[in-house]
Image (tube, helix red, strand yellow):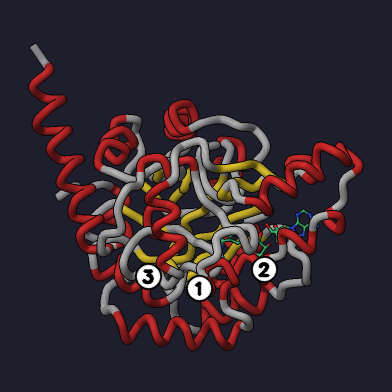
């Protein structure tokens, strides 16, 4: 067992979180991770309405008696999103753990704290971590440049970002981006983090509610198989390097700083990306993946995965590292 301030604060067995993932963070996955002793998280905006999110929370409760959380991400979107109503649905459902992400968390952290909810704020820069801490976040999930989805605009990888963040904030920090195995967990703990957050690794599990072809693609991919899009929009996003991603990168190069979201909206929409997970053609749309695809080679159950990562980390800490001390 690995006990940290983070596991104690949230009442979970293992310091492993399954972070928010658009179209992937549904009850099947969140409950499987929580049942395995980690922290499963439902992705709020995957549900089409706040009421649908309430229903999904109720469904997840039928699948696990363990704690799980809900992710609320605030980022630019093609259609307006009623974030306040989603936040209220989370509070009304008596959820006690929320992962906020994206810009301007102050309002939502305030809303959640008032309702007695513990907030993990996921961010990509130390200065944003300090802001979230000041506004009352309970945990920082610091997300390195390796990560899937939105790595921010500073391009600082976790080898620097984790210790830089831990040195500045007082609340527990968990490390996000680039984690898939016990080596990563041991590294994060050695750097002062108190847990890890994984997304892409949990996509390639038996319980992830996505097409088997996507899981297979992740298991076969190498560390160079991701691409960065939306750089010119200052909403950088790391996605799997497929035909659509290459087309978006080509358009971005061609248009330069003059590129507008409308130039690529037909290619990048979340609705289109969703069909990848449903139909299993990995070239149909954009889908998020981290560089860590290069470290993922199998499709285990969440229970097998979480147990294996903790066992490996313990073996590294107690076995390999301790024996090096002369
Ligand atoms: P969408 O169809 O609204 O947009 C597709 C992509 O384009 C998203 O990455 C979005 O951030 C980006 N985008 C849209 N309008 C933009 C603009 N004006 N400028 C720059 N970039 C723009 O996205 P969706 O898949 O329906 O998701 C809805 C929301 O959830 C988006 O804000 C998205 O970023 C966010 N999201 C959440 C998670 C998560 O883990 N919770 C993961 C990915 C995306």
Looking at the figure, which quarter contains the C terminus?
top left
Q: Residue at x 86, y 37 (%)?
A: 256
Q: Counting residues from the N terminus, which is met first, the one under dot 3 or under dot 1?
A: 3
Q: Which residue is drawn at 62% across and 65% down?
A: 273
Q: Residue at x 23, y 65 (%)?
A: 36
Q: Which of 305 and 4 is in front in this view?
A: 305
| Vertical placement of residue 53 versus 266, above or below | below
What secondary structure is marked by label 3?
A: helix
Q: How far apart are marks 3 and 1 (CA)?
A: 26 Å
- The answer to whether one can see residue 78 in this image is yes
Q: How far apart are marks 3 and 2 (CA)?
A: 21 Å
Ligand 1 is found in the corner quadrant, namely bottom right
Residue on which disc 1 sits: 115
Residue on which disc 2 sits: 272
Crowding at label 1, few (<14), some or many (≥20) Cα neighbours within 10 Å?
A: some
Q: Is mark 2 within 8 Å of ligand 1?
A: yes
What secondary structure is marked by label 2?
A: helix
Residue on which disc 3 sits: 29
- Residue 311 at x, y = what percent? 15, 46
Q: Counting residues from the N terminus, which is met first, the one under dot 1 or under dot 2?
A: 1
What secondary structure is marked by label 1?
A: loop
Q: How far apart are marks 1 and 2 (CA)?
A: 35 Å
């Amino acid at each position: 067992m690995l006990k940290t301030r983070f596991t104690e604060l949230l009442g979970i067995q293992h310091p492993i979180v399954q972070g928010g993932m658009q179209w992937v963070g549904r009850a099947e996955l969140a409950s499987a991770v929580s049942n395995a002793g980690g922290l499963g998280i439902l992705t709020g905006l995957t549900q089409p309405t706040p009421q649908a999110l309430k229903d999904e929370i109720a469904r997840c409760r039928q699948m696990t008696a363990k704690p799980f959380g809900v992710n609320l991400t605030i980022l630019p979107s093609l259609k307006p999103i009623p974030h306040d109503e989603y936040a209220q649905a989370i509070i009304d459902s008596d959820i006690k753990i929320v992962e906020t992400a994206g810009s301007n968390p102050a309002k939502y952290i305030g809303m959640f704290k008032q309702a007695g909810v513990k907030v993990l704020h996921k961010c990509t820069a130390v200065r944003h971590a300090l802001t979230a801490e000041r506004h009352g976040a309970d945990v920082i999930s610091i997300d390195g440049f390796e990560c899937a989805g939105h790595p921010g605009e500073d391009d600082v990888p976790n080898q620097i970002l984790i210790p830089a963040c831990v040195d500045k904030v007082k609340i527990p920090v968990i490390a996000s981006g680039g984690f898939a195995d016990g080596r990563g967990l041991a590294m994060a703990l050695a750097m002062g983090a108190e847990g890890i957050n994984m997304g892409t690794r949990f996509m390639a599990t038996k319980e992830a509610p996505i097409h088997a072809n996507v899981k297979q693609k992740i298991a076969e991919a190498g560390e160079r198989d991701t691409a960065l899009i939306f750089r010119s929009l200052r909403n950088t996003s790391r996605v799997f390097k497929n035909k659509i991603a290459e087309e978006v990168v080509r358009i971005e190069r061609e248009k330069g700083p003059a590129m507008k979201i409308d130039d690529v909206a037909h290619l990048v929409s979340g609705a289109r990306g969703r069909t990848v997970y449903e139909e299993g053609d990995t070239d149909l749309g954009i889908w998020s993946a981290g560089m860590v695809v290069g470290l993922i080679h199998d499709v285990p159950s969440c229970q097998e995965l979480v147990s294996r990562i903790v066992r490996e980390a313990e073996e590294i800490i107690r076995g390999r590292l301790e024996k090096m001390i002369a």
